[in-house]
Image (cartoon, rainbow, N blue to C red):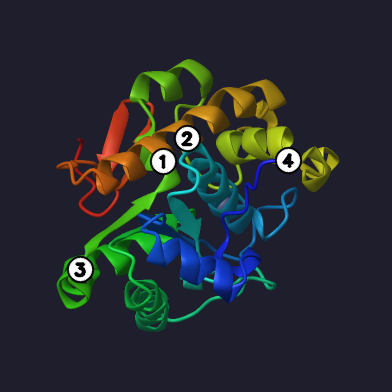
Amino acid sequence: MADERVFVGDLTRKEFRERIAAGTIKAAIVPTAATEQHNEHLHMIHDTLHASYMAEHAAQKLLPQVVVASPIAIGVSEHWMPHIGTLTVRPEIFCEYVFDVCNSLVRAGIKNVLILNGHGGNVKPMMRRIDEYKDKLGINLRFQSYWDVYDPALVQQHMEHGRLPGHADEFETSTMLYLAPERVQTEAIDNESAALGTREKGEALVGPAVDGVAELLRQMIDGEDINLPTVTFYPEGKRDLVSGEPV
Ligand SMILES: [Zn+2]
């Protein structure tokens, strides 16, 4: 069976060292997400499972060039603390922790690092620091959420509410119904948008995210210019998640 291991933690130090020495490893992904309330019906690890899945499968499309760091499963979720069980860290702690993980990869000899995010609350804090971090590390460093790669037409085609990622509603319910239906407690769904979630919509949207992230990595490895804003999708189109402006 082909060796499809991509997580750094699933390699021995010998395997990692030999791949670096051979020039095999061209890029790394650092998944970042959250452990936070996802309404009544989804598990709180939702965003982390998604960022990890997209990272793992995108890396596997580019075997053996891309490795994936252990996911950072607690992000900036202060806004959900009224719902107990949510875990959060201060924005500056989150950013510095992610920086240190990236720096470890740089010290190992990796020149392209994609921080692949799965939680909206992490975007503004990290986008305020990313240029500084890129300069400090002296490598090709990017921060993107996995949904940034979507074509707005695809989102409009499948999301009846037109919003993506939203929060624990149509999109996230659909993708989890596809990836791990046992993690969706459908009987507990208590909002109209989540009730629109289907496995079919999830299947239609997971593949293009993996493909888009793999393509983004290819562009990074090839040193191409990339113009991909961090966005969120609304019925009227996509908006920059930091500025709120249409893009
Ligand atoms: Zn979520």
Q: Secondary structure at mark 1?
A: helix
Q: Are marks 2 and 1 in contact (CB under 8 Å)?
A: yes
Residue at mark 1: 213
Q: CA distance from mark 2 to mark 1?
A: 6 Å
Q: Secondary structure at mark 3?
A: helix
Residue at mark 2: 209
Q: Residues within 10 Å of mark 3 (few under 14, many from 20)?
A: some
State which quadrant residue 86 falls in: bottom right
Of residues 62 and 103, the one nearer the viewer is 62
- Is residue 157 placed above or below 77 in the rendered structure? above
Q: Amino acid at mark 1?
A: Val
Q: Give the position of the C terminus as an image quadrant.
A: top left
Q: Which mark is residue 134?
A: 3
Q: Amino acid at mark 3?
A: Lys
Q: CA distance from mark 3 to mark 1?
A: 20 Å
Residue at mark 4: 1
Residue 208 point in image, percent of width and height: 48, 28
